[in-house]
Image: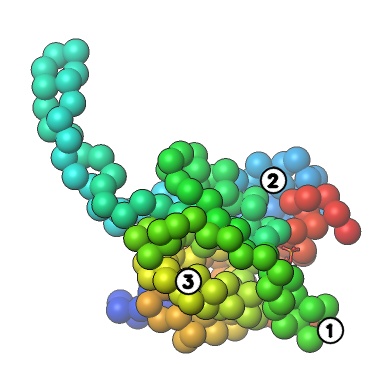
Amino acid sequence: MAIENVYGPNDNVFVQDHPLIQHKITMLRDKSTGTNEFRKLVEEIAILIGFEALHDLPTEDVEVETPIETCMSPMISGRKIAIVPILRAGLGMVGGITALVPSAKIGHIGMYRDEETHEPHEYYCKLPSPIEERTIVVVDPMLATGGSASDALNLIKERGGKNIKFLCIIAAPEGIKRLHEDHPDVQIYVGHVDRELNSAAYICPGLGDAGDRIFGTK
Ligand code: PRP
Ligand code: URA
């Protein structure tokens, strides 16, 4: 899968330019895409981004008996995975990551943005333990100002989380910069970087309010 490291070879920001991801993001953007299709697309894109983001999971050889003979063959080893969606919209990506790693445990972080100040507010945090021993995959389709994601990563780190990846579908340049500066140790995987934020801190051209489009609310 083609991947572009936007800030340089040693940085932790990876933007994916695979045509399947870009095609599906275009369908997501379309305001005539309904809730059912929107949900399916978010999950499919999560699979495609997650596949690449998990490329460095450690494996160990185990013995397996095939119908022909016994051999050694790799399986995922070591640290177990925790998926942590940022509520609400992050929930839409969970099914995509569990399709890849069905045994993953799932935590939840509840965040909402104040409509006036655009500042994030935490309302829930429950993480699987021992969180410090897991590879933690934080998912949220939208990275706008970066405030929600940055605060979510702070919460995870305060509870001992160390090995963290953040996956989003669309990011504003401002959000990537903020998140990367606040958490340079976290690998950030992005489906597409859009032009800018507008005065309401919405991503342009973006796809509107991801939570409302996933859950059919307004
Ligand atoms: C959206 C989105 C992110 C956040 C991004 O959630 O899912 O969590 O905004 O914005 P930021 O980068 O400027 O913090 P929202 O607050 O709308 O909540 P919702 O998912 O419950 O709709
Ligand atoms: N949250 C969204 O759902 N969309 C945006 O454009 C910005 C934040």
Where residue 12 appears, x then y in whole percent? 38, 74
Image side of residue 125 versus residue 64, left or right: right
Q: Quadrant of residue 118?
A: bottom right
Front-most of 162 and 175? 162
Is the residue 199 above or below the residue 102 in the image? Answer: below
Task: Give the SS element for disc 1.
Answer: loop
Image point (74%, 51%), residue name: 214
Residue 89 visible from this viewpoint: yes
Q: Quadrant of residue 152?
A: bottom right
Q: Are there few (<14), some (14-19), or many (20+) residues within 10 Å of tag 1?
A: few
Front-most of 113 and 127? 127
Image side of residue 113 versus residue 16, left or right: right
Amino acid type assigned to the residue bearing label 2 in the image: Arg
In primary-sequence order, the first of circles 3 and 1 is: 1
Image point (36%, 51%), residue name: 80
Image point (63%, 80%), residue name: 147
Task: Give the SS element for disc 3.
Answer: loop
Q: Quadrant of ligand 1?
A: bottom right
Where residue 58 appears, x then y in whole percent? 25, 52
Residue 191 visible from this viewpoint: no
Residue pointed to by mark 3: 159
Residue pointed to by mark 2: 39
Amino acid type assigned to the residue bearing label 1 in the image: Glu
Front-most of 199 and 24? 199
Q: Are there few (<14), some (14-19), or many (20+) residues within 10 Å of tag 3?
A: some
Residue pointed to by mark 1: 116
Image point (75%, 75%), residue name: 113
Q: Residue at the top extreme?
A: 67
Mark sitting on residue 32: none
